[in-house]
Image: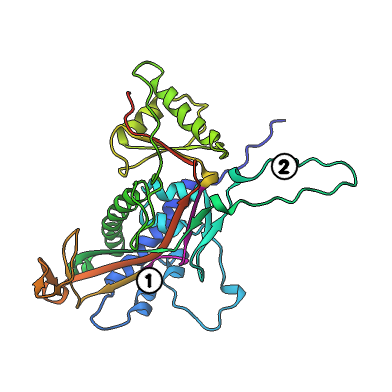
Amino acid sequence: MNRPIPYRPDYSALAQNEQRSWHRAIAARALVAKPNEDTSKLAAELAKSAWPGDERAHLILRAGVSPTTTADLWTYNPVAPYRSLAPSSAALALFQLGLVLNLEGVTTIRIPSVAGLPAQPIFVGEGLPAPNLQWNFATDTVLGPARKILMLSAVTADLQKATGDTAANVIGRVLADKATRDIDATAFGTAAADDKQPAGLLHGVTPIAAATAGVGAMTEDLGALTGAIGAAGIDPSGVVFVAGPREAMIIKASVGSKFDHTVLMTLGLPAKSVAAFAPAGVVSGFQDNAPTIETAKEAAYHFSDTPADISSSGSVAAPVKSMWQTDIISIRVRANCAWAVATGAAQVITAVNW
């Protein structure tokens, strides 16, 4: 008798549903936006009317109630709402594979370095005392403090005449493109931490020399990246490779079906660069259960990728537009997060020869 094949969850479908629910929630807020009014209740009613079966969108838009009981609590991967806003972000995909911590109510969390543990036996004889592990906090990983992500976008109020799904698709695309590009560029950068952003995951990482051009150059490079992680005392199991579009596609097209490592494609790394990360050494944290969504129709803001104060010390930013005068809906998404990587858990080659 043949054994039945069990049904397996389609995780990609779950991610798509989560993304769709978030886009619908954002669209609902935009579709009911009114000057100087709290439209949270209207947005929730619109979502229930337009998408009666989307309980996730209803929950996102649900206002806080008092008191909240255990019946109101629900569990999900804390990175999921952020990935829904930036589904193509390689950085957020990487964070889901690593350690995710809650930063609510704390400034920083120190994670001891396993690589820094002294050599101690774990097998003991009968009746003998077990060794007490002495954590080495001198080489630990520090997560936090959380930094603020603030994204602004705008759509014409004519979109309020569209169907709910049309609005959700348009607004979702605008925010996804912005979030994916900016999060990856920061996360896979080499800049040090400052008052605005966490340090790039590749900050302080010395690039590994690339293999010389040849048939096995790519294999040698991937092996060198993985070997360097292991040599640093970090568990290299499940190493994740991150590269630009060209390099990521070459890796995916070249490896065999038994290659079981994740390859992520990003616009956050320059051409000819390939990075490797050990999930065991990557940690991220979020201060909010989900990003905050806000809309406005009477604001004025600077339409620029390098915004400035609208008026400061006699200078005026340009171009500045009035939402009310131009009949535009401003959408703002706000969140607080942080990330860090253990020493040695990130490796990079910046000039591959393939």
Which percent across, then down, holds residue 189?
Answer: 34, 47
Which percent across, then down, holds residue 255?
Answer: 44, 25
Which amino acid is tagged 2?
A: Gln
Query: Which residue is disc 1 drawn over?
Result: 49
3 displayed left or right of 44: right
Q: Which is nearer the eye, 173 or 1?
A: 173
33 displayed left or right of 248: left
Disc 2: CA contacts within 10 A as few (<14), some (14-19) or many (>=20): few
Which amino acid is tagged 1?
A: Ser
Q: How is the image coloured?
A: rainbow
Q: Is residue 243 magenta?
A: no
Disc 1: CA contacts within 10 A as few (<14), some (14-19) or many (>=20): few
Q: What is the count of numbered marks?
A: 2
Q: Which is nearer the eye, 176 or 126?
A: 126
17 displayed left or right of 114: left
Q: CA distance from mark 2 to mark 1?
A: 62 Å
Splitting the image into 4 quarters, where does residue 263 fall? top left
Give SS at disc 2. Answer: loop
Q: Quadrant of the C terminus?
A: top left
For residue 220, above or below residue 329: above
Give SS at disc 1. Answer: helix
> Are circles 2 and 1 on residues that touch, CB within 8 Å?
no
